[in-house]
Amino acid sequence: MADIFGPASADLAVTVRPTETRTFDVFDTWFKDCSEPTAEDGTEMQAAFLNGMIAALRSLARVNGATSADSSIKIVPEVGTDDALLTKAVQHLIQRGQPSYAVDTGSANAWVVTLAPACVEYKEGMPIRVKISNAVTGACTINVNGLGAKQVVKLDGSALGPGDLPAGATVQLHYDGTKFQLVGALANTQKRLTGALTLYVNGATGSDTAYDGSSNTVSGTAGPFATVQKAINVAAIYAQGPYAVTISIAAWGTNYAGASTPYYPIPTLIIAGAGSTSTVINGGASSCALVVTGLNTVTVQGCKLRSSGGSFAVLRAQQGAQVYIATDVDIADGGAGLNAIYAGVITVNSSIKFSGASSRCIFAQAQGTIVLDGATITLSAAITGTEFVQAADGGYVSAPYCTFVNPGNFTGYKYTATLNGVIETLGSGANYFPGSVAGRTLMGGQYA
């Protein structure tokens, strides 16, 4: 193959580079023309200089090396065309991205990479690509060519966590002047739990900004959150999976503010208060105490839920959400006690208490479902409402084999089934539910 950067067939060309004899000071040197054709006052053209130029051009052309399949085949063929350096050598180098790619040789959360050629400093905007060798289990750093460890963060500035990146993942990073930001789809994914997680809430001693929710006692940054919503927000950092997040809510002499889940899937939540007489979540005059939305599952136990405004449901499951009432749950006030809407489902596993004025204690609407099979339902205070149970707009209530404690405490219709709503009692009779007025069916509603 022809040598496109050499004298080639010129007379006296040699194949071994002569010894370099030139010396340079700190200033650049330049060629000078002769003052006239016969004068010998111009700069001499030395072979060593030309050979140096040829060597530099050859290195540029050959930096891409050979193909991985055949070491005798060069990535850039050495043919005598004008674009041999730019289009073929330089652009191939950029396209293949080898100078900015390295395989991590460090540990799970302390990446070590060696770029070739070695970078001499971290420069803002510098991109690198890394194939990590170990699954990420926590906050990560990267050390490039021994320049020092720098933090690796997501686009929002948060640290990496368990399950964010598997072993063998190739990621792209950009240096922002202080740390490396993870770019691309993985930078915005939820974390994955590697085991069950408990988050603590304590209205008396907690803080949503100073503590991480990891403990009910304060020690450094470890300590409880102040609100239930903060705990749900932190749980929502994680993707839905096999592990649940328990939100442990301490007893408090003041009501906790209402809370809601996001619409996107998060881990199963267990909202566990210290008891229905000491842990109270109150949506206030303009909100529900708890709203569960989307394909999420929440179990509630050991707390009292209120919506003191009278027009909002106390506990609402909507848009496919699943809510389970476990033990020691008290529902008070609100436009409805339990409200399942838009394919939401509420299931009472054992018992539930109603202790405050509600327009209706149980309300399934718009394809919502409430399941009370075999539940013990206690009315611990006098309640005056419209009806005890309502199913409307295709809503469905299943309530066979229930036990009602203090049924005389409810004043109003026993039930209302309307607009194709269905109330199923398996033939328990018209006087089955609490109420001072006989139940009714309207506009296609059914009671069985």
Image (cartoon, rainbow, N blue to C red):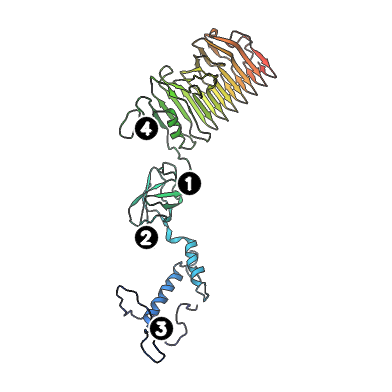
Q: Nearer the viewer, mark 4 or mark 3?
A: 4
Q: Nearer the viewer, mark 4 or mark 2?
A: 2
Q: Pointer 2 and pointer 1: residues touching (CB < 8 Å)?
A: no
- What is the CA distance from the residue labelled 3 to the residue labelled 2? 36 Å
Pointer 2: what residue? Answer: 119
- What is the CA distance from the residue labelled 3 to the residue labelled 1? 55 Å
Give the mark, 1 or 4, whose residue is nearer the N terminus.
Answer: 1
Pointer 3: what residue? Answer: 14
Give the mark, 3 or 1, whose residue is nearer the N terminus.
Answer: 3
In the image, what residue type sits under mark 3?
Answer: Val
Q: Circle 4 — which element?
A: loop
Q: Circle 3 — which element?
A: loop
**Residue 47 as seen in the image, left or right of residue 190:** left
Location of residue 157 (image quadrant): top left
In the image, what residue type sits under mark 4?
Answer: Ser
In the image, what residue type sits under mark 1?
Answer: Leu
Q: Residues within 10 Å of mark 1 (few under 14, many from 20)?
A: some
Q: Circle 2 — which element?
A: loop
**Residue 438 as seen in the image, left or right of residue 96:** right
Q: Is residue 14 above or below residue 124?
A: below
Give the mark, 4 or 2, whose residue is nearer the N terminus.
Answer: 2
Pointer 1: what residue? Answer: 186
Nearer-the-camera pick, 124 or 240: 124
Question: Residue pushed farthest bottom?
Answer: 38
Q: Position of residue 415 (x, y in %)?
A: 62, 14
- What is the CA distance from the residue labelled 4 to the residue labelled 3? 74 Å
Give the mark, 2 or 1, whose residue is nearer the N terminus.
Answer: 2
